[in-house]
Amino acid sequence: MKIAIIGATGRAGSLILNEALERQVDVTAIVRRPEKLTVDVPYLKKDLFELTTADLKDFDVVIDAFNAPKGKEELHQTSLQHLIDILSGTKTRLLVVGGASSLYIDDDKTKRMIDVSDPKAPYYPTAYNMYRAFLELPRAKNLYWGYLSPAAFFNPDGKRTGEYQLSDDRLKKNSDGKSEISMADYAIAMVDEALHHQYDNQHISVVSL
């Protein structure tokens, strides 16, 4: 299994990269600035928007951990659309580090997190653009994909417990009644899905135990 990680020097991307390396997975980092890598790993120095089908054809899975900079949150939409365009019709699976904004908050699946989010909140531009980007995945033709949403609180400083629970595209809470997952445990879930592809062409979520 050959895996590529886009945005491998970011907060989530670097943890996913380390998790893959710990398991001795054949992994390549796709980065604009390889000097920011803190581990010895093969890399492709290229901007996401310059990637081609040929660049990615030899990978079984491409993990999209791209994070748009503040003020350019619309890049979440254009970047994912670019990856959809170049991977549609190939055997390479696109796995996306998603957001909680696209998760449903009711069992009837009529209302999503984005629908109850405050448009004036600092996080809203990212949440909205990630939600809009996600909507194109199920519509894509001949695309092999997966979208893993974290819980509402995607904790960058949380501990790696080695445990997590998966659910469908509804927001779930843990045994303490909290919707939370550490980025370290999220990384475990992402690498597990990349290796075992249990949820092909599905939107799933992950929360701590």
Image (cartoon, helix red, strand yellow):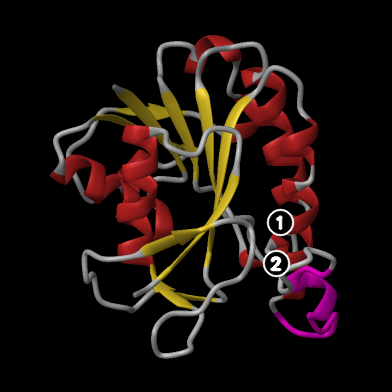
Q: Number of callouts in the render? A: 2
Q: Mark 1 points at which residue?
A: 130
Q: Identify the residue at the far bottom of this view.
A: 176
Q: What element carries label 1?
A: helix
Instruction: Describe residue 102's horizontal placement relative to residue 203 as left or right.
Output: right
Instruction: Describe residue 144's horizontal placement relative to residue 7 as left or right.
Output: right
Q: Where is residue 27 in the image (x, y as percent from the top left)?
A: 28, 31
| Residue drawn at 47 percent across, 30 percent down | 62
Q: Mark 2 points at which residue?
A: 101
Q: What residue type is labelled 1?
A: Met
Q: Which of 177 and 195 lies nearest the eye of the viewer?
A: 177
Which of the image's four quarters has the C terminus? Answer: bottom left
Most common secondary structure along the magenta stretch: loop
Q: What element carries label 2?
A: helix
Vertical comparison of 139 with 14: above or below:
above
Q: What residue type is labelled 2?
A: Ser
Q: In which quarter of the image is residue 192?
A: top left
Whole-angstrom CA distance, mark 1 to mark 2, is: 7 Å
Res. 191 visible in picture = yes
Res. 10 visible in picture = no
| Residue drawn at 64 percent across, 65 percent down | 170
| Residue drawn at 78 percent across, 39 percent down | 136
Instruction: Verify whether residue 134 appears in magenta.
Output: no
Q: Are marks 1 and 2 in contact (CB under 8 Å)?
A: yes
